[in-house]
Amino acid sequence: MASSDQQSSSEVQYIFKDGYFDLSGWERSMFRIITTVVIWWLYIGASVLILLLGGRWIYLGIYMLMFAIFVTIRIKQSDWKVSYLVSKLSKFSQINLALILPPKSKDLLIKVKDFAREKKIDLIPALVYFLIGADSIRDSFLRLDFSPDEIENMRKKILEISVDKKIYQDKKTLDEEFKIFVFNITFSAFKAAQQLKKESLDEETLALAALSQSNSFVTWFNDYYHLNWGDLLTAFSLTVLSRQKNLNLISGLPELSQPAFRPKKIKVNKSLTSRPTPLLDDYGIDWTDRASRWQVGVMIGHEKEYQTLIDILNSGQTKNILLVGPAGSGKETIVSYLAHNIIKGEVPKSLQDGRVISLSIASLFSGTDKPEAVFNLLLRISEELLRNSDIVLFLPEFHVFKQLRQAEKSLEAFEVFKPVFSSNMNVIIGSVTPEDYHKYLEGDSFVQSNFSIITVEPVSQQEAIEILAFKSLAWERKTGIKISYKAIKRAVVLASSFFANICLPTSAENLLTEALEGAKRGKKKILLEQDIVNLVSVKTNIPLEITDKAEKEKLLNLDELIHQSVIDQEEAVDIVASALRQYRAGLANTDKPIGVFLFVGPTGVGKTELAKTLAKIYFGSEKLMIRFDMATYQDKRSVSYFVGDPTGETAGVLTESVKSRPHSLILLDEFEKAHPDILNLFLSIFDEGRINDNQGQLIDFTNTIIIATSNALSEYISEELQKGTPYKVLTEDFKNKLTTVFKPELLNRFDEIIIFKPLTLQHLEAITKLKLKEIQDNLLSRKHLEVSFAEEVVKKLTELGYDPVFGARPLNSVIRHYINEPLAVAILSDEISEGQKSKIKFELIDNRIQLTIC
């Protein structure tokens, strides 16, 4: 069969051509029978020659036996290995994908074709149906926390939605579709095989290929079962890994293929281009030696940063590189991966004989506490380096070389190493956090002119999941507790949300290891997603939900949920709820904050209350509302306090708050009173969802809701509403008038400008009832006290708390005076017995609110 489809990649043309697919069913059966008979005759002939004839016939018999064994093994394999094909890509102009398709996979694809014709089903669902029945694929789905029954039901569901849906007009039509199908599947499987480090297109690679196709069935299947490519790839990788014997874990991470090389021995060569480095050997860590013993070298993510490093070193312009990234972002991993590739010989020629050695200031202080002795060591080590040209020196916490001095106001350690940095003989790789880079190195002209800067970003959530999934194999062996894949995913997601000040995967790993300790104490056999959710709930004191369904229901009913706490303001609630639903449904720009709103209206009408309610409903707790009184940032000096001073000495309250709570609601009270420089700062935050702090670190606002409030033009709002101006007309006119308060470019960056109407006496009565119910619920749960309020009391409190100018704000003071204070006196004076259920009534007697204990 020759595919009519062809695909080019880097000037290589891929085709699929295999005569086996052109054979009829009986011809394929005869081929298998003849092959089996020939092999058996070889075995029988070899046995006769060896056992019966003997003598010189034994040698021929042994040859026949070895040939029979070779044929038996060979007919089950593909003609070529994937790794061989990949290594020869640059030498071929055309590649036949059939050469890496083993007979078992060929027979499977032919079965799929027959099944599709019989059941009137499309080819892709037919392939997925067969593959899910395979043991290796079932194992992968089990790792994704599907039960055996759920996996079996998948097959039934596929037939349920697919059978009798595809009508093939004739055999020729099916044959043409099958050719295209086989090519697309094998091409995708070839890509998957490279990622899984498979040598042929077996069941795992075909399954990944099938579930990566652009097809309505695949879209339905992945959506229905909440699958994505990253999860599938990780699960299949783990399944492949779990079948390997003598698995070698490197710092908890596995290398998926066995080394095809012999580790090099580090020694001085005869030409003396590499000379002894006894001090460097004593105080440094030789990572090439560790890589040769498979102790370091696995890297997931950071491909871009690593390739940039190689490109710089290969350019010949500089050998000094500075990796700048947050603590735990993977700077050390990149360097260890370089050592790994040096051992494998997969680096440019200039690095082939390199030794990667890590040297920290802390190691130099291991035998002394005197800076003078350390400086002497540094001087002698620099001399060793200047005698060699094969060292790749890694200097973690590079800024410490700028901090360390021999004595106060004397020579820096950095100065001692300057000849090494300037010589360009050895590769120097330093690492530093953005904060320390900004503080100690950014202003150093020597660093800027002699070092290439590479920014190292933390790994993505999917990469963190993959790293932790591999590490989970080691944890499972150590603890005997199975770690659910959903638990790993949830740990990564929640760590990103609530512990963003620590880089992934460290933050998620901390959660998993802590949860594992809890599981060990509880003698549990499996760590579930709910265990992670419970742990984070305890650590953050925020109630968390586990299901997507609950979140969707919450968003669909967001208006009703808000109105349980916010009275009136129907238009405001509808606009906010609609905007958040659109964001969650994927209809909004994800490169901006979730929502950016300007709430305008008189004091005490519910602007802050709506913000609190949103924080509680959307993020799970009022504690995730970060509130700023913008009236305190009116002068130019306060700008530095808000975002951090330019020197980097003092962090900004806004940036630090968002860094520690990236999933939060930011409330900017009295926004119009802030200094113009601060208002300009929000232009980029509202528009791009990001800003650099004073340390140069990028702060992400894309997981926040930002609400600015303003009392500007409140009188105009009240006057227009009293005239009966429709809300929509008022909103448009009001936006035009707001340009006298805010710049048009700032107003245009708000998703919605929402007008809050003044409260009526009727609205305030409803608010009074809400606040009294909070008191009732609180006392019943904490003190076992039943409190009731006469209707006259509610009306009296409303009357006392109503102020047309200040809205509902005076109501809190009224309730504290007439309700909370009498309750406090009764509880503290032992009129109410602690722990016993008591009833308290508030009644209006002689126009006075009085408390009665029943």
Image (spheres, grey):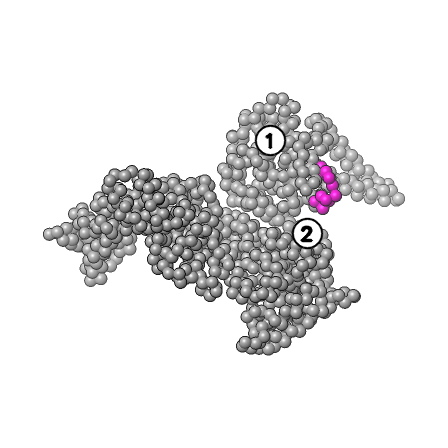
At label 1, which amino acid type do we have? Leu
Q: Residue furthest front?
A: 740
> Which stretch appears magenta?
86-98
* Residue at 26 percent of width and 42 percent of height: 721
Question: For residue 575, what is the image quadrant?
Answer: top left
| Alpha carbon distance from label 1 to label 2 | 36 Å
Q: Is residue 406 above or below residue 837?
A: below
Q: Are marks 1 and 2 in contact (CB under 8 Å)?
A: no
Question: Which label belongs to residue 508?
Answer: none
Q: Residue furthest right?
A: 56
Q: Secondary structure at mark 1?
A: helix
* Residue at 86 percent of width and 41 percent of height: 53
The answer to whether residue 516 is visible is no
* Residue at 54 percent of width and 29 percent of height: 162
Q: Nearer the viewer, mark 1 or mark 2?
A: 1
At label 2, which amino acid type do we have? Gln
Q: Is residue 358 left or right of residue 563?
A: right
Question: For residue 32, what is the image quadrant?
Answer: top right
Q: Secondary structure at mark 2?
A: loop
* Residue at 59 percent of width and 72 percent of height: 413
Q: Is residue 416 left or right of residue 150?
A: right
Magenta residue check for 321: no
Q: Percent position (x, y) of residue 517?
A: 49, 57
Question: Which label belongs to residue 258?
Answer: 2
Which one is nearer the viewer's eye here, 577 or 718?
718
Question: Which label belongs to residue 123?
Answer: 1
Q: Percent position (x, y) of residue 407?
A: 56, 77
Quarter of the image with the N terminus is top right
Mark positioned earlier in the residue sequence (1 or 2): 1
The answer to whether residue 93 is visible is yes
